[in-house]
Image (cartoon, helix red, strand yellow):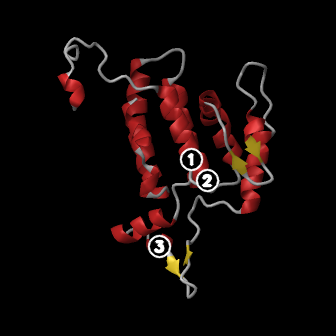
Amino acid sequence: SSLFTLPYWDSNLLRHNLDVMHIEKNVCDNILGTLLNLDGKSKDNLQARQDLEDMNIRAELHPQKKPSCKFYLPPAIFTLSKKEKQLLCKIIHGIKVPDGYCGNISKCVNFTEGKISGLKTHDCHVLLHQFLPISARGILPDDVTALLFELSSYFRGICSKVLHVDELDRLEERIKLTLCKMEMIFPPSFFIVMVHLVVHL
């Protein structure tokens, strides 16, 4: 890395400083974009399905070419119908919190179209820690919901006010399994650098 050529690198006490909130925002955007199939934000698209085909994995999700030369993408385990997207957005839109707990998330939610946009970093922090797993319960399959709860628990653990070394060791072991479970559910394109950095926090 070119960082190693910096004159102060040897005396730098904290060489790898990762911004938790920045990583949380990117992970939250990835999850919401993929679940709600937002234009330009979803990691589950034709290219992602063609990657699966090239890698010869998950044959049930491979794109199917129609006579009209268009592609049909079979629904994945996390694929939501329009009604389910609207319901998820409606739940998030209706969340009531004490003053100062977070921004007004309802302004970012359009539940008639089933879209969420314009979330700030702290909004993503609160969504990932508390509201997203609870909102998704009963809408998404149990496997996906359990995964969201595991991810939420991990971020809550590393962001808690009091940290115990043995608890951090346990979180470090558990996040590896959580990411492996995510790889079994989400397409490879979901795993951008920011998602990978979760394991380094």
For label 1, the SS is: helix
Residue 179 found in image quarter: top left
Q: Is residue 42 left or right of residue 167?
A: right
Give the residue number, with chain letter if any, for mark 2.
Answer: 35
Question: Where's residue 108, x and y in %?
Answer: 73, 39
Q: Is residue 34 left or right of residue 89?
A: left
Q: Residue furthest bottom?
A: 67
Question: Where's residue 25, x and y in %?
Answer: 55, 35
Q: Nearer the viewer, residue 46 or 59?
A: 46
Give the residue number, with chain letter if any, for mark 1.
Answer: 31
Which amino acid type corresponds to the residue marked 3 in the rendered image? His
**Vertical position of residue 161 compared to residue 196: above or below:** above
Residue 135 visible from this viewpoint: yes
Q: Are marks 3 and 1 in contact (CB under 8 Å)?
A: no
Residue 140 found in image quarter: bottom right
Which disc number belongs to residue 43? Answer: none
Residue 80 found in image quarter: bottom right
Please rate how many residues cluster around mark 1, counting C-alpha atoms within 10 Å: few if below 14, some from 14 to 19, many from 20.
Answer: many
Tell me which residue sits at (45%, 44%) in the image: 178
For label 2, the SS is: helix
Tell me which residue sits at (46%, 64%) in the image: 47
Q: Are marks 1 and 2 in contact (CB under 8 Å)?
A: yes
